[in-house]
Image: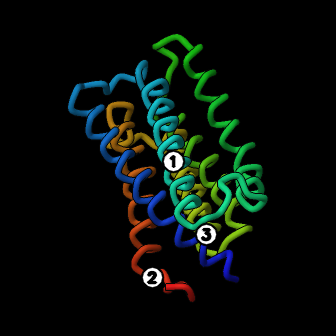
Amino acid sequence: MEHAALYRRALAPVAITVGVLGLAAAAFAQAVGWTEPNRFAAFWMGVAGISMLSALLLIRRQALKGGEEFWSPPTRRVAQAMAPMLAAGLGLGLLELLRTPMERDGIRLAAIWMILYGGALNSAGFFMQRGLRLFGWLFVVIGIICHGILEFGETSWLVDTQSHWLMGWAFGINNLAYGLYLKLTAEPLETE
């Protein structure tokens, strides 16, 4: 149970950082007018790369501060659990870049990315407390709802020009809220 508490404590700053980056990226894309679908996949794959690098640097800093090795067996297990879903998201993003600009669909890709990210979080959650698995399921459900609305419903608010805000809400606000929740509800460690 001590490892679960440590993971929970380590995850809070990572989730907050990823949330802030997601919100900032969505605001930036909207501010500069990149609302057409031909820029969506490349832009958000870049944001994902920056977010992943930031998360790894935060985790490394936490490991050094705690006198632990960075690439420990538990860290490897979590990374291995998340890798298939994250690799699928990267692959589908690259395939989206191969489509002609007229065939690209930011909302569809965002929904698929949400589902895959949720699956990755759910997989990682088997090494932590139940909350991360539930958070993963939230992404899966939101992604399915967005994909269903896209396929079966005509809406004026879920259109390609809003795809960056959808990503900002899904990956920005949700991660930020989860990170703040973890930070505010963290129990002090025995050594503190």
- In the picture of the structure, the residue carrying the numbered disc 3 is 7
- For residue 93, what is the image quadrant? top right
Mark 3 or mark 2, which is nearer the start of the sequence?
Answer: 3
Q: Is residue 27 above or below residue 144?
A: above
Q: Nearer the viewer, residue 154 or 27?
A: 27
Q: Quickly name the residue at label 2.
A: 185
Q: Residue at x 54, y 39 (%)?
A: 151
Rendered position, 71 above or below 100? below
Quadrant location of residue 160?
Answer: top left
| Mark 1 vs mark 3: in front | 1
- Could you tell me the amino acid type at mark 1? Leu
Is residue 187 something that shows in the picture? yes
Task: Please state, as top left, top right, bottom left or bottom right, where the N terminus lies in the image.
Answer: bottom right
Residue drawn at x 44%, y 62% is 13
The residue tagged with tag 3: helix, strand or loop? helix
The amino acid on which the numbered mark 3 sits, given as a three-letter code, is Tyr
Q: Residues within 10 Å of mark 2 (few under 14, many from 20)?
A: few
Residue neighbourhood size for the residue with mark 1, other residues' Cα within 10 Å, grouped as few (<14), some (14–19), many (≥20): some
At numbered mark 2, what does the secondary structure look like: helix, strand or loop?
helix
- Vertical placement of 161 versus 144: above or below? above
Q: Position of residue 111 (x, y in %)?
A: 53, 43
Q: What residue does disc 1 label? A: 57
Labelled pair 1, 3 in contact (Cβ < 8 Å): no
Give the camera-side residue of 2 and 164. Answer: 2
